[in-house]
Every structure is written in C-alpha cells, then in structure tokens.
Image (tube, rainbow, N blue to C red):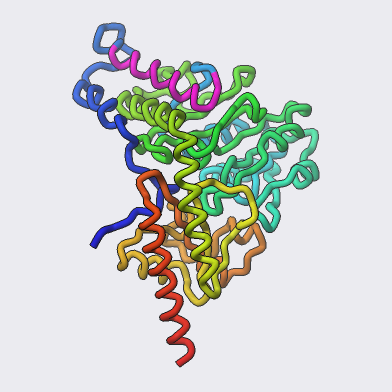
C-alpha cells in the first residue's frame, strides 16, 4: 500500500538541498562558532549566511533575527519578556492562539498580569473592533497569530497593528504557520515581534527564530555565554541553522509555485467534500492558507475517521499536533462558536508540493465510502 502524508502543518520533509547544506556542519562538529580559530569561523560563517537568508524571507535586517530552538521557545520569549520588564498591566492574546502562546500567557496571569483573550468571530477572525474594545492604557503586549494552524484562517495583521502602533504597544505575531506559505513582510505588517519555526516549511526540526523590531529592547530569554547578541545564550546548532537558512531561501524562491499548487489541491478537496452529505468545512468563507482544509464528517469523531483513513494509507490529523491524544473539542473551534459534537469530529488536511491531485481524488473516494458505510449502518 502506498502511504500519503497529508499533515504538513505539523511538519514537512526537508526541502531540496537542505540536507546537503547541513551535512558539512554535521561532519565537522568540533568547532564552536564562538571560537576565533578557523574551525569556529567555519561555523560562524554558516550562521551569518543563514541569518541573512531568514531575514530576507520576512523583510528584515539580519541582526533582527534571533535564533531559537523553534516556534515554542520564540513564543515564550515574546510573552515572558513582558514579565521581565513590567510588574503589572494587561496582556491581550487571541482566543485561537497555539498553546505555545496561551500557556505562557497563563503564567503571566499567575504573576499578576491582567491576561485577556481577544474573541474570534464565527469565521475564525480577530477583528479590529474586538481588539479596540480591549486595549487599555496599561496594555503591555498584544499577540495575534498570522495564520491559524488548524483552520488556516489568515488574520489582518496590518489592520490590527494600526491600533497598537499609535499607542506604542508591542505587537507579537506567531507566524509559524504563515512563513513559507504566505509572503511575510515584517515592516509592512507593523509588528514588533514574530516567531518562526523551520520545520513548517522544509527546514529541520528544533530550530526557529524570534524576529524583533530594531527599536525594541526585548529581554534575553536564555542566559549564559551571551550568544545571539546576548539575547539567547547557548552554543548554536550550526547544522540546523544552516538548514533553516536553506529552507527559507527555497521557500522564498518557490512561494508562487507553492501557493498555486496547494490551492489547486485544496479547492479540489473542498469541491469533493461538498458532495458528501453531512460535511462541515470550518471557516470556509475566510481567507485561509492555500494548503489547509479543516472539516468534520457527521457521525464520526476525529479519532475514528483518522484511524479509518490511516488504514487506507492517508496520514492526516485532528488539528494541532501538540494536542494529539486529547479527546476534547478544539479550543479554536470552541472560540468560533462551533458546538462540541461537531468540533470533536474535526479533521485537518494540509498538503504540500509533493502531494498530487490524484492523491486528493483518492482521498475523496475513501471519505465518500466511509460516509456511505456509516449512513448504511445507521439506516439498518
């Protein structure tokens, strides 16, 4: 049986040339990039090159790129930076954030900050009206993700930041799902902090970055030897950083091709889904990532459908990979007002360049057969 991977929002295969870019730094591990000798300079040169490649992906200067272990650490540094600078105040996070934002926000609340969730509407959007209603004079940070990892809904970040820029409130954006799938312009968006993770767009796991506005003196998160301009200490993972840079360059060069290909597959899947009785496509009318479909099939909980699809050779997910195994409704769908029985059936399909229209057509046949089988059993 051929197996088809359709969970690219959880993790992607390495993009072309990424492994080859990493290999020299995996073979020569003895040089510490903080050392001044030739072995150290060999590693430092790779870091400098990658920093420039990642910077070009999001339209910033290289010195604005602070490497981290991934999106989770970057989000934590963004949120917990508030605790390092203030004793109190308000922190606004959207109700549809990834746990890597919601959990540090809870920690801030435990430390006495007024943490308030910005409500999403039924289409999964955070509106300027919703944000405006919650902004106060003592707001220390606003955090709204660029694109949701479950629904794929894209937020109007530039519109939201028009409210915070005039007030001098830093705006953080988890762009982990957006980078490599959408054009990201840090300057045009008006944000002060964004988080990235390489393995979401063809890079290796365990490497990411926090992008920081030049005018923002954000605190260090990991203390020690002073690497990353004293903002994130620890000996750098040179091979992973090199792979991150290579993936960023590849994603930037092939963005239009990626979007066209994935949108074609997404639209074909949604057309097929609409012919199946009892299908709900979440946030169907919102602007979404070109590769993502989040849906429920009436009569199925997500685990049952996932196992059925897995037996047929299709690897999909029930939403965030970080929430796998927890049989509770998606907090994203709950925030959108979706009832619990429907939300418990949610399944996410996320495609990439290596998927084909034939695979999507085969998936549609399997889904239709599963729905027909269920309806037949229910009508006996």
Residue in the foreground of this view, choosing between 92 and 122: 122
Q: Quadrant of the N terminus?
A: bottom left
Taking the image as shown, residue 312 lies to the left or right of residue 229, namely left
Quick check: is 49 in the magenta stretch?
A: yes
* Vertical order, 286 against 247 (above or below): below
Quick check: is 306 in the magenta stretch?
A: no
Q: Quadrant of the C terminus?
A: bottom left
Residue in the foreground of this view, choosing between 122 and 340: 122
Residue at image point 43% right, 87% down: 377
* Vertical order, 372 against 18 (above or below): below
Residue at image point 39% right, 21% down: 50
Q: Quadrant of residue 238?
A: top left
Taking the image as shown, residue 267 lies to the left or right of residue 361, namely right
Residue in the foreground of this view, choosing between 56 and 33: 56
Q: Position of residue 30 (x, y in %)?
A: 21, 19
Q: Position of residue 104 (x, y in %)?
A: 55, 42
Q: Main secondary structure of the magenta part?
A: helix
Where does the magenta region start and end?
A: 42-60
Residue in the foreground of this view, choosing between 210 and 76: 210
Q: Position of residue 171 (x, y in %)?
A: 66, 32
Q: Quadrant of residue 374?
A: bottom left
């Amino acid at each position: 049986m051929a197996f088809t991977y359709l969970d690219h929002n959880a993790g992607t295969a390495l993009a072309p040339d990424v492994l080859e870019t990493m290999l020299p730094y995996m073979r020569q591990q003895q040089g510490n990039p903080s050392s001044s000798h030739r072995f150290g300079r060999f590693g430092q040169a790779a870091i400098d090159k990658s920093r420039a490649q990642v910077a070009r992906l999001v339209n910033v200067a290289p010195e604005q790129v602070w490497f981290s272990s991934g999106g989770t650490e970057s989000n934590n540094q963004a949120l917990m930076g508030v605790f390092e600078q203030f004793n109190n105040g308000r922190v606004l996070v959207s109700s549809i954030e990834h746990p890597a934002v919601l959990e540090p926000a809870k920690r801030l609340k435990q430390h006495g900050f007024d943490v308030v969730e910005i409500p999403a509407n039924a289409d999964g959007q955070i509106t300027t009206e919703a944000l405006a209603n919650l902004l106060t004079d003592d707001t220390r940070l606003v955090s709204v993700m660029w694109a949701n990892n479950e629904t794929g809904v894209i937020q109007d970040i530039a519109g939201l930041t028009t409210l915070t820029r005039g007030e001098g409130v830093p705006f953080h954006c988890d762009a982990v799902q957006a980078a490599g799938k959408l054009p990201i312009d840090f300057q045009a968006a008006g944000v002060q902090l964004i988080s990235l993770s390489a393995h979401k767009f063809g890079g290796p796991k365990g490497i990411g970055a926090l992008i920081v506005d030049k005018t923002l003196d954000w605190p260090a998160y990991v203390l020690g030897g002073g690497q990353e301009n004293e903002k994130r200490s620890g000996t750098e993972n040179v091979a992973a950083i090199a792979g991150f840079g290579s993936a960023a360059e590849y994603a930037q060069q092939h963005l239009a091709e990626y979007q066209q290909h994935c949108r074609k597959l997404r639209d074909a899947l949604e057309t097929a889904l609409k012919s199946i009785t009892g299908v709900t496509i979440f946030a169907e009318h919102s602007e979404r990532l070109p590769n993502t479909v989040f849906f429920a099939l009436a009569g199925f909980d997500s685990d049952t459908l996932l196992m059925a699809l897995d037996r047929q050779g299709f690897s999909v997910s029930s939403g965030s990979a970080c929430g796998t195994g927890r049989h509770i409704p998606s907090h994203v769908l709950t925030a959108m007002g979706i009832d619990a029985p429907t939300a418990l059936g949610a399944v996410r399909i996320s495609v990439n360049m290596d998927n084909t229209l034939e695979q999507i057509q085969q998936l549609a046949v399997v889904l239709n057969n599963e729905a027909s089988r269920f309806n037949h059993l229910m009508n006996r």
